[in-house]
Image (cartoon, coloured by chain):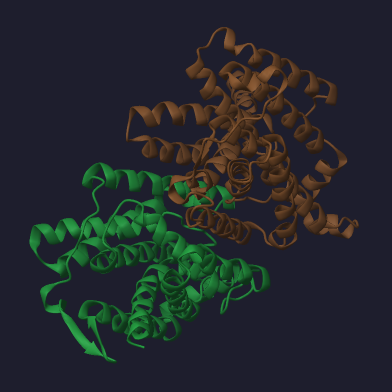
Amino acid sequence: MTSTGFQRDISVLVGGAVLAMAPLVLGDYWIGLLTQALIYGAVAAGLDLLIGFGGLPSLGHAAFFGMSAYGTAMLTTQANIDPLAAALISVVGTAIVAAAVAPFFTRLWGLGFITVTLAFGQVIWGLAVRGGSRTGGENGIVRIPRPKLIADVLSTETGFYVATVVLVAAVLFVISRIAHSPFGLSLLGIRDGEQRMTALGYRVNVRRSVVFTIAATSAAILGTWFVFFNQFIGPSTLEWKQSAGFLLAVVIGGRASLWGPFAAGVLLTLLETVLTGETTLWPMVLGIFYVIAVLVIPDGIVSIRSQLVSLVSVARGDQK
Amino acid sequence: MRFWTFQVLNGLTSGAILFFVTVGLTVVTGLMRVLNLAHGALFLVGGYAGLATIEATDSFVAGLAVGALVSGLLGFAIRQAFATALLGHTFHQVLLTLGISFMLGNGILQVFGGTPRRLLAPSYLSGSVDIFGVTYPRYRLMLVVLSMVAGLALWLFWERSSIGAMVRACVDDRPMAAAMGIPVERVFSVVFALGAALAGLTGVMAAPVKGLHIGLDFEVLLLAVIVMVVGGMGSLTGAFIASMLVGMIDVMGQVKFPELSSLTLFAPVILILIVRPQGLLGRPLA
């Protein structure tokens, strides 16, 4: 909380530079895995804007990630549109959908908001599953082309990975700037004292709608990027368990810290990919994670340091 | 015409099952403001426990009893073990109950395997009857009739008994109920366990119609959430009307517009939440 904007920007830069070095030590398999993990981590950070700052717990965030992913997949494979143009159209389209539903959804809070986002996510999922030849139904869409950037850098795992690091760093940079802007602070104000902020003349609903749209748009950008990476999209991307996974990352990471949800999103994705290959017990492990997250670290991993500090001071017998 | 009679009966059957599942969910949610996402898993655990019992003892009634007992005890254990967390932040409740449901679902997979299982209706309820010009399975008709009877009994208990009045008081105004000397905590525990037991009982009851398979827990949970939202959290009458409505919409949607079935099912939920967040018959959330 005490870090300045300059310090935060530097840490994003340094972190990005370190991550970009990973191909020097890791093979293609791990680089591919890390690419996917970074994408999911960034989605969790975007969702943190909505949950941590906006105070709105969404259980349908995968809908925006998947909507944009499907849009890009359909436009490139069926309408033969250039991948970059398709990406732009999909992201803008998803943002418009989000902005259109936001004023209605954000009137609700708590259980109501959870249920409405869950229902919305199920509608989108159902459309993808039952979409026939357009969405490929249960089979999804395959052979999605990657954009041709400078020197065709995206055609190799390493090139795509480095580009992902740049994109994720850019997304995190923007998200962090928004979070620490007067707008972000006003969201915290609304979260903690809605009536007071209303009395002060803030248009609470507008601000909530804006943060909803921003979170959805960041998910849309990453969804499109995910499709380029994976070159395949199926309805499982839109399942509500996916949305629950994003929510878990935010809570495990620590709400309103941004980097916590990002780190948790990356780690959970790595863990899931490694463990699903090893054991059919993965849902059990995941379930235990959920329970432990709530019981042991309800404020997320970012709170662990302050908890340790207070433990140490108790052990020393310091006066409060 | 006969086709539609058949579909209406299917809608009623589906609605009857939904009603039994949702009663527990809606009362718990209305009462404790806890969205129990493990409700579907409790349904499935009960179903499989009943299946195992019926295969061992050949008695459908024993299966029903064991299904209800196992889920009820599980519900009681969950409520006792996570009492504080269950009343915490909404997203904590959601993650906690979802985690429990992942664990239960995976537990079932480990014990019973992934092959879908069938459970036959007891011999005295198998076969078909002629009704309204169609031949319809006796067991399904029995479910529809049973849901009406049970709905009426529950309503009487809810509206006319002193225990029902205590629960209603806790739903409407928890602090005031506590001030009047109602043991709110105990009411929570009992209702939570009973809701779970009812879910388990329904798991066995629904098995001859829906079968038992991994993933059914989430299908049932989502439908129950829809019914709860449409009917209004904590409203018994609302749950009954909404069950029949959603059962009908689900069956008709799948027959008439299969490619839009998620829309026909979930769009009313979104609409109701926006226009009338308290549901058809619920009270405004304080």
Horizontal and vertical percent position of residue B209: 27, 68
| Residue lying furthest front | A80
| Residue lying furthest right | A201
Residue shown at 53% from the left, 22% from the top: A32
Horizontal and vertical percent position of residue B144: 31, 81
Horizontal and vertical percent position of residue A137: 46, 51
Q: A317 and A40: which one is in front?
A: A40
Residue shown at 72% from the left, 30% from the top: A172
| In this view, A72 is above or below B286 | above
Residue B17 visible in this rendered orientation of the protein: yes
The chain painted green is B
| In this view, A207 is above or below A259 | below
Chain A as rendered: colour: brown
Q: A179 and B34: which one is in front?
A: A179
| Residue lying furthest top | A24
The answer to which image quadrant residue A3 occupies is: top right
The answer to which image quadrant residue A46 occupies is: top right
Residue shown at 53% from the left, 69% from the top: B264
